[in-house]
Image: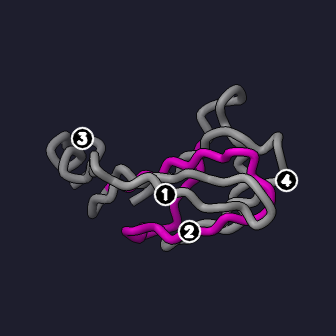
Amino acid sequence: MSVFGNTQQFAQALNTSAPRTTVNGGISGTIEWIMPCQGSGYKKVMIQLIDLMGNASFTFPVAFEAEPVILTPGSTTGAPVTAVTVLSETGATITGTGSSDNGILIIEGY
């Protein structure tokens, strides 16, 4: 059954108390990330880069079944997709080059 047509399944996947996690960059800055959708179908991770310089790696609390995709919300608020230097079903590494590396990235999949 597809999660896209099933509101109940989506509601079960939504974790409104998912913790926001901060990871320090290898040199400076941080990322903050949260995984509000952790269901057996749809999964979503939201990442905010804050003056990130160097690598910041993290592991998803619930693994994706297939390699997820990277989305960016737009040129004014989005971080460059190329900032995601490693992406797998179990985690990601975000690499920043300094004060210009700010914005939001979204990772989605199932």
The residue singled out by tag 1 in the image is: 21
Marks 4 and 2 in Cβ contact (< 8 Å): no
Marks 1 and 3 in Cβ contact (< 8 Å): no
Crowdedness near tag 3: few (<14), some (14–19) or many (≥20) residues, C-alpha within 10 Å: few
Q: State the image coordinates of residue 5 (x, y, percent, origin top left).
A: 24, 41
The residue singled out by tag 4 in the image is: 97
Confirm whether the magenta stretch covers residue 27: no
Confirm whether the magenta stretch covers residue 62: yes
Marks 4/3: CA–CA distance: 40 Å
Q: Nearer the viewer, mark 2 or mark 3?
A: 2
Q: Secondary structure at mark 1?
A: strand
Determine the residue positioned at 55% across, 55% down.
69
Marks 2 and 3 in Cβ contact (< 8 Å): no
- Amino acid carrying mark 1 in the image: Thr
- Amino acid carrying mark 4 in the image: Thr
Q: Nearer the viewer, residue 16 or 10?
A: 16
The residue singled out by tag 3 in the image is: 5
Determine the residue positioned at 76% across, 67% down.
26
Q: State the image coordinates of residue 19 (x, y, percent, origin top left).
A: 38, 55
Determine the residue positioned at 18% across, 51% down.
12
The residue singled out by tag 2 in the image is: 58
Image quadrant occupied by the N terminus: bottom left
Q: Nearer the viewer, residue 47 or 73?
A: 47
